[in-house]
Image (tube, rainbow, N blue to C red):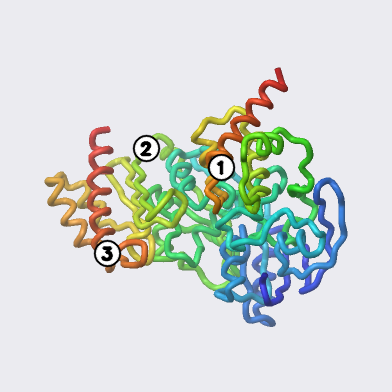
């Protein structure tokens, strides 16, 4: 049971959503955009999140479209992960999204919700980091387009009241080779203790989740991956380029994570180089 | 634009019937089904989206009712275990030992029902992917898998 009350608003346009947020923020302290709701409701039950107003974006057609436009594929922020998986527009996206939560939850978890999650994993960002995705963000001054990698640094760097409308990816990534390695502590449905996505297209690129307290990719790591050095030397160099201290928690010690990370890089690299 | 204050009157379509109800905007679908409508088949177990005991079908897709607001699903078709009658999957659970204590059974049956409808000829991989959304603490998974296969066989024979 959620023990506090809030108002619920369901706008039908992006403009309505943003203007509602701005106006209501003048009166109420805690206004939230709401998409799939799985995280907000589970946090609300434990008082980890409180809200005075929630703005449900699922009735906004722009946030719900999956559309081919010129050479890009556009994914609305309120599409569920299963809706994207079922369309299977890009095998990399399908593969990553199938690892997130369980099948039933993926009928509610949305692309935008996962990208903006308060949890540290945010695995939906991994393919976006690797495919030079662009995103559209709506705010008080209209809609702007940004390169995903220029606006995502540990989390999505958008202003209060701004709304993630959609994500677009170049169709040419459809045929790119990739390797997914996702390790969990036990079973199959769980948060990852390591998730590595490696993509081969004009060289290799890698993105990581579960290793640090945020998902990441790095130009320096990608440069080493394409350096043609001995594989052991390459892995050691990458270890020095991890942008933070490897996580240690009840699911895995940092030693274990580091060992998994080295093995995962070796497997993905070997797999893609052979290809 | 639709706006509900803290308390709102909404219309829900559950098991083919329309009902008008006063709910809190913060009420989950599970709370409304159980406490306002007396439909207690879906269980309030983890209430965190982990166990699947509260599974219902929303527009034919399985969802966890503990992580949905009732106000979100106004006008949509909701199917609870009480609305499922004389189906192959129910018969198969009875005949193949698909349950032990029975607490998780409504969630498993609804998920399996949706699976059979969406993928009548699914492979083992798809069955596993869907059924991983539910937990049975009696660990009766073999009986559940057996029931799913038996229901699929009944459906195939029925359609011949």
**Which mark, by number, is residue A138?**
none
User: Measured along the vertical axis of the image, is residue A8 above or below residue B127?
Assistant: below
Taking the image as shown, residue A231 lies to the left or right of residue B83, namely left
Of residues A148 and B53, which is closer to you in this image?
Answer: B53
Provide the residue designation for mark 3: A254
Tell me residue B40's x, y (percent): 75, 57
Of residues A114 and B123, which is closer to you in this image?
Answer: B123
Provide the residue designation for mark 2: A176
Mark 3 neighbour density, 10 Å: few (under 14) some (14–19) many (20 or more): some
Indicate the secondary structure of the residue bearing disc 3: helix
Provide the residue designation for mark 1: B130
Of residues A145 and A194, which is closer to you in this image?
Answer: A194
Q: Which marked residue is nearer to the observer: mark 2 or mark 1?
A: 1
Q: Chain of mark 2?
A: A
Q: Chain of mark 1?
A: B
Q: CA distance from mark 3 to mark 1?
A: 32 Å
* Circle nearer the N terminus (2, 3): 2
Residue name at image x 66 percent, y 23 percent: B156
Q: CA distance from mark 2 to mark 1?
A: 28 Å
Indicate the secondary structure of the residue bearing disc 2: loop
Tell me residue A178's x, y (percent): 35, 40
Quarter of the image for residue A58 reads bottom right
Q: Chain of mark 3?
A: A
Indicate the secondary structure of the residue bearing disc 1: helix
Tell me residue A185's x, y (percent): 37, 55
Residue name at image x 45 percent, y 55 percent: A190
Q: CA distance from mark 2 to mark 3?
A: 32 Å
Taking the image as shown, residue A54 lies to the left or right of residue A207, namely right
Residue name at image x 47 percent, y 65 percent: A119
Residue name at image x 81 percent, y 59 percent: B38
């Amino acid at each position: 049971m959620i023990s506090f009350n809030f108002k619920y608003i369901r706008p039908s346009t992006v403009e309505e959503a943003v203007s509602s947020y701005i106006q209501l923020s003048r009166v109420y302290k805690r206004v939230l955009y709401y998409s799939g709701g799985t995280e907000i409701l589970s946090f609300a039950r434990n008082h980890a999140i409180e809200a005075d107003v929630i703005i449900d974006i699922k009735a906004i057609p722009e946030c719900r479209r999956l559309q081919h436009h010129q050479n890009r594929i556009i994914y609305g922020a309120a599409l569920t992960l299963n809706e994207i998986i079922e369309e299977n527009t890009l095998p990399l996206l399908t593969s990553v999204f199938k690892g997130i939560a369980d099948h039933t939850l993926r009928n509610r978890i949305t692309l935008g919700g996962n990208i903006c999650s308060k949890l540290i994993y945010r695995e939906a960002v991994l393919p976006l980091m690797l495919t030079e995705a662009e995103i559209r963000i709506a705010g008080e001054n209209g809609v702007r387009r940004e390169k995903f990698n220029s606006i995502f640094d540990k989390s999505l760097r958008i202003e209060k009241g701004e709304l993630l409308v959609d994500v677009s990816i170049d169709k040419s990534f459809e045929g790119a080779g990739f390797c997914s390695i996702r390790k969990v502590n036990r079973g199959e449905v769980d948060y990852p203790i390591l998730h590595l996505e490696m993509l081969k297209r004009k060289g290799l690129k890698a993105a990581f989740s579960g290793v640090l307290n945020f998902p990441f990719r790095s130009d320096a790591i990608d440069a080493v991956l394409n350096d043609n050095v001995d594989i052991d030397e390459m892995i050691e160099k990458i270890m020095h380029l991890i942008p933070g201290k490897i996580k240690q928690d009840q699911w895995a010690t940092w030693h274990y994570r580091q060992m998994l990370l080295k093995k995962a890089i070796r497997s993905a690299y070997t797999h893609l180089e052979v290809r | 634009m639709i706006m509900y204050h803290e308390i709102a009157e909404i219309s829900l379509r559950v098991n083919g019937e329309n009902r008008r109800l006063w709910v809190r905007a913060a009420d989950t679908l599970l709370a409304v089904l159980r406490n306002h409508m007396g439909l207690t088949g879906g269980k309030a177990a983890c209430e965190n989206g982990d166990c699947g005991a509260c599974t219902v079908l929303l527009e034919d897709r399985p969802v966890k009712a503990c992580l949905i607001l009732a106000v979100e699903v106004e006008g949509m078709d909701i199917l609870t275990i009480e609305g499922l009658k004389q189906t192959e999957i129910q018969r198969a659970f009875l005949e193949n030992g698909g349950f032990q204590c029975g607490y998780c059974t409504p969630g498993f049956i609804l998920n399996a029902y949706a699976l059979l409808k969406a993928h009548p000829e699914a492979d083992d991989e798809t069955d596993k992917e869907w059924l991983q959304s539910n937990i049975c603490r009696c660990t009766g998974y073999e009986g559940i898998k057996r029931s799913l296969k038996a229901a699929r066989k009944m459906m195939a024979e029925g359609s011949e």
